Amino acid sequence: MKCLNCVSKMDYDVVEGKIPRDLLEYDFAEDAMDFECQLAESQDVNFTQTLSEPLTIGSHIICTGTPSEDIPWFAINIGSEELEAGRSDISVHFNVRQPQCYVVRNTRRRGKWGPEETTAYRLYPFKVNKQFTIEIVVDETETLWAVDGDHYCSYVHRNPSPFTARWIEVTGIRDAFLKISKTDNYPTLAPERPEISLTTSIDNPPETEQPVWKPNLIAKITKGVPEGYQLVITGRLRPMLHSFAIDLMDGAREWPLPNIHLHVNVRAHVESQRDRQLVVLNAWLGAWGMERRQRTARLIPGTLTTFQIVRGPTEWSIYADDMLIGELEHRASPGGVKALRVRGDLYPQRIFLCPATSTPIRD
């Protein structure tokens, strides 16, 4: 990676939070007073790195640090215009709120905040007194955020865009370390992607030892999915089922964005009172194509469920517990599939590749 800006160690002044004299006239509970002090200290523990050149596609920001118990939140801000406390435009505000155990993303323009975003692809990853590494990569339409090598969330560019940013600010972390560079891969700290093994049939488990499959995984299919073979994924559905996606891709990576030959998206939250869940099929080949929607899935939240994705001569066929829930024609050469990604409310336990000669077909 080519470094665009120097590596900067945080240089800060810690100003102890004080309750203003006039607030002492109120009957605040002791914990509320402590929280006000902590918030004041959070805002005063800060560091700002001025950008020597604009952020571009592939700009890569790494921030490390350790959350402390006495500071209830910390934030990374990518800002535009001159830095002015409480008034500057902020293109991306990444705010970790430890008491609530979630992360807020937002944008501030002309002193006003937009709608907050809090959804993420994994559980809350931060712990008090445990060092973290946050990676940020700038793409054409969004910023992507990873924590300790695992993709955490993305944030679509708003106005102002990060491409107009002039500074990056870190608040609430005493030992923060900031590095700005360029990358052609993200996350750079991602572990080696596991390989999906091949077996003789769906009833025979793979001879090689299965990896411990994590939620929101990416796995390699180095030799692809041959015609007449199926990818088998057995996993538990989240009890409060919302949605999940299974993607067949041309590369085992998050970014640069891979082509998605098959995107299977089950949306249980759409008209959730109905007895079947919505299944959306599509492909992303530089842009999303035309969706194919059908309400065909009868999934039971909290149960162990098996999905089979079969490569046919002209189409992909998707089954859930032996029931056909959808088909999508090949929109690109199926031989280009080299990776699997699973995101959302499906927690895989077994994944393997095998011939599909005995695949059942039921309506």
Image (cartoon, grey):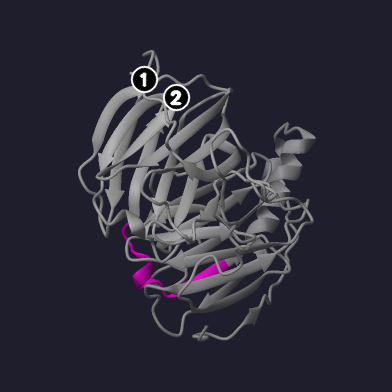
* Image coordinates for residue 286, horizontal then vertical, percent: 27, 60
Above or below — where is 192 with respect to 50? above
Q: Is residue 56 above or below residue 38?
A: below
Q: Which quarter of the rendered picture does the C terminus lie within?
A: top left
Is 156 or 210 nearer to us in this picture? 210
- Which residue position holds label 1? 362
In terms of depth relative to the viewer, which is nearer, 222 or 207? 207
Instruction: Specify start and end residues of the magenta stretch as a single range.
Output: 157-169
Instruction: From the viewer's perspective, tell me whether residue 170 is left or right of residue 228.
Output: right
* Residue 59 screen position, x and y as percent: 44, 74
Please tell me which of labels 2 and 1 falls first in the chain: 2
| Circle 1: element type | loop
Q: Is residue 362 above or below residue 41?
A: above
Under mark 2, the amino acid is: Asp
Q: Are marks 2 and 1 in contact (CB under 8 Å)?
A: yes
Give the farthest residue toward the left. 290
Characterize the local packing of mark 1: few (<14), some (14-19) or many (20 or more) Cα atoms within 10 angstroms. Answer: few
The picture quadrant where one finds residue 245 is: top left
Q: Amino acid at mark 1?
A: Arg
Q: CA distance from mark 2 to mark 1?
A: 7 Å
Is 144 left, or right, of 173 in this rendering? left
Q: Position of residue 207 (x, y in %)?
A: 67, 47
**Is 293 in the magenta?**
no
Q: Is residue 83 visible?
A: yes
Horizontal placement of 298 versus 62: left or right?
left
Residue 163 falls within the magenta-colored stretch: yes
Q: How many marks?
A: 2
**What residue is at 29 percent from the left and 48 percent from the top?**
283
Q: Secondary structure at mark 2?
A: loop
- Give x and y (percent) for residue 91: 40, 61
Which residue appears at 72% of the width and 50% of the height? 37
Q: Which residue is mark 2?
A: 322
